[in-house]
Image (spheres, rainbow, N blue to C red):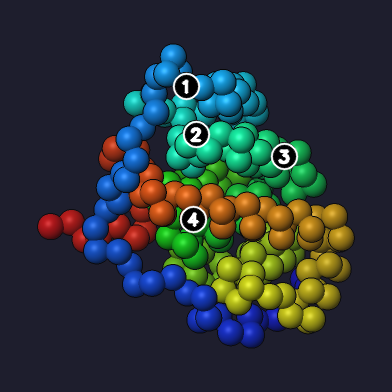
Amino acid sequence: MSQMPPDPDPDRGSPAAKPPRLPTPRLAALRDPAAFDPAQHAMWESVVSGPRAATAVRPEGQLSGPFDVLLRSPQIGTAVSDLGALLRFSTSLGPRLTEVVTLTVASHWHARLAWSGHAKGARAQGIPESAIERVARGEDPAFKSPSDHAAWSVAHALVTTGHVSDDLYAAAISVLGERTLVEVVALTGYYCLTSFLLNTFEVPVSHGVTTPWDPPAE
């Protein structure tokens, strides 16, 4: 198996200490399409009719993920939705590598909602629970698949340092090829954007769902 070199500075860019409380939504959920303007209607339809349709609307009635937030800027929201659908469902990565990258980003930023959904997706793709737990701790998940390891190594290097070293680049391109490496980098950036939206506006996980960064139960 091709070995990925270690990150040059794994601590740089680490998120702040674990928040002492669970997120509290900072925006009121938008659940009434009758009150939307035309741009909001167009965005809503682009989300609920696309490849994520089965999970597009939360049980409470608002759009899932960052998309309820993005209804405040629907032109950007539609573009983000379209880009996300392309990166998640229409690349050479396939579902497994997509989940590897997404978990790596969500873990670094402690993006609880992204983590909760994609940890479930990772399990469905056969990613071992031990690897998921190591990703949550920011540790090398010790993937046996060269492709899994390359995708994790690149995403982890990007979120922790913002760079990919020459040695890591050479190793990753030999495993993934040019197209897939471009898509790993693009997906990493997309989920950084998603994580920032979820964290800034404190979009909560569903009731009863826990994540590795929840405060201790009192």
Nearest to N terminus: mark 2 or mark 1: 1
Nearest to N terminus: mark 2 or mark 4: 2
Nearest to N terminus: mark 1 or mark 4: 1
Q: Please indicate whether residue 143 sits to the left or right of residue 113 in the image.
A: right
Q: In the rendered view, tell whether residue 206 sits above or below residue 131.
A: above
In the rendering, which numbered label is found on residue 86? Answer: 3
Q: For the N terminus, which image quadrant? A: bottom right
In the rendering, which numbered label is found on residue 71? Answer: 2
Residue positioned 44% across, 14% down in the render: 34
Residue positioned 79% across, 81% down in the render: 166
Q: For mark 1, what is the residue?
A: 36
Gap in angstroms between the C-alphas marked 2 and 4? 16 Å
Q: In the rendered view, tell whether residue 45 sits above or below residue 81.
A: above
Q: Secondary structure at mark 4?
A: helix
Give the amino acid type for the residue marked by disc 4 in the picture.
Phe
Q: For mark 4, what is the residue?
A: 196
Could you classify mark 2 by the number of other residues whose Cα lies within 10 Å: few (under 14), some (14-19), or many (20 or more)?
many
Q: In the picture, residue 28 is in which quadrant?
A: top left
Nearest to N terminus: mark 4 or mark 3: 3
Q: In the picture, residue 81 is in which quadrant?
A: top right
- The front one of 23 and 36 is 36
Looking at the image, do the residues carrying marks 2 and 1 touch, with CB atoms under 8 Å apart?
Answer: yes
- The front one of 66 and 108 is 66
Give the amino acid type for the residue marked by disc 3 in the picture.
Leu
Percent across and percent down for residue 56 are 52, 28
Q: Residue furthest front?
A: 37
Q: In the picture, residue 3 is in which quadrant?
A: bottom right
Percent across and percent down for residue 105 are 55, 60
Could you classify mark 4 by the number of other residues whose Cα lies within 10 Å: few (under 14), some (14-19), or many (20 or more)?
some
